[in-house]
Amino acid sequence: MATRKKTASKKKRASRRKKVEAKSKGLGASELSADPPDDVRALAATVEEDGGTALACYRDPLGGHWQILVSLPLDRVQPSVFQRDLSDTHVKKLTAVIDRLDRFLDPIILVRTEDGRYSTPNGHHRFAAMKKLGAKAITGLLIPDVSVAYQILALNTEKSPNLKDRSLEVIRLARALVDLGDPVESEFELQFEDPAYLTIGCCYEKRARYSGSAYHPILKKCEGWFDDPMSECIPVREARADRLLAVDDEVARLVTALKKKGLDSPYLKAFVVARLNPLRGPKAAGEFDETVDKMLDRAQRFDPAKIEASQVTASAGYGGGD
């Protein structure tokens, strides 16, 4: 069974980053171009065999890691399995801008997968825009270290994600990591950002129209990281999702009852969730199972007949979002 970190409920104090002296870190401009090691040369040769071109092998200026600027046929590229879903609106905007410029100036990030294709953990929307424009090829930065693809989630800022996008992206990454060494969940705090995303992601997988933003503020106070392999943690997250969906069913039942009573407000769901919430106040905290038990109990004792329209109106300032 997954075990929660003892420090999970405590807020970490952000450590101040030491001021770095200008021009003191990384490689100089003349040091980026050098003779690549054999494994990088071999990867560049593979790109050529796959119908692409290795335009340049060089070291990144900060860590000195090798990477290859490549051009690839569009049909050799695919989005990574843990990418967030495409936003049609964002693809449409990108397509229009790239088409108007008649230039592709922002290479996507790539890693070569075992099946001989090239996966992009950062660049899904740019790739889709180029595909929509009918481009034959696309440029990208090919990273020799495949594991970097699973670390790059924290850098993915192409499209600012909403809660659904973000949580689905996180749980998909967690599932992909099971096949890549099955690391401990808590080792990916930086990439996942919030343990609640994992549970909410499972909810969205089970119910596409789940209102995650209504419950996220509560989960942030009762969720924590697990110090166990991802393969053991995901079933726990799925079980928690089932319990949250049971709460959501109760909330839907109560909202329906309030509407039948004649109350009609866009804040009804937020009002009900706020009434069921046992973790009120900025310093409130609790354990997940205990919190859900209390919410289900409060749902059973919630009497729509006693609710007045003025109470719902007064709750309009309640922010249930993230």
Image (cartoon, rainbow, N blue to C red):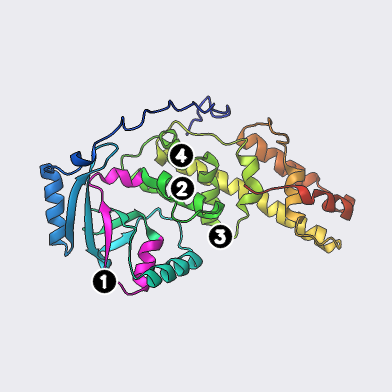
Q: Earlier in the sequence, mark 1 or mark 3?
A: 1
- Look at discs 1 and 3 and give the one toward the viewer: 1
Give yes or no for contact between labels 3 and 2 (Cβ–Cβ under 8 Å): no
At a point 27% along the width and 67% down the height, the residue shown is 74
Q: Earlier in the sequence, mark 4 or mark 2?
A: 2
At a point 72% along the width and 37% down the height, the residue shown is 278
Label 1 sits on residue: 136
Give the residues in magenta: 125-150
Give the Cα separation between the discs numbered 4 and 1. 42 Å
Above or below residue 47? Residue 194 is above
Give yes or no for contact between labels 1 and 3 (Cβ–Cβ under 8 Å): no
* Label 4 Cα neighbours within 10 Å, binned few <14 / some 14-19 / many ≥20: many
Residue 160, label in figure: none
Label 3 sits on residue: 208
Amino acid under label 1?
Lys
Label 4 sits on residue: 233
Amino acid under label 3?
Ala
Give the SS element for disc 1. loop
Give yes or no for contact between labels 4 and 2 (Cβ–Cβ under 8 Å): no
Give the Cα separation between the discs numbered 4 and 3. 22 Å
* Label 1 Cα neighbours within 10 Å, binned few <14 / some 14-19 / many ≥20: few
Residue 170, label in figure: 2
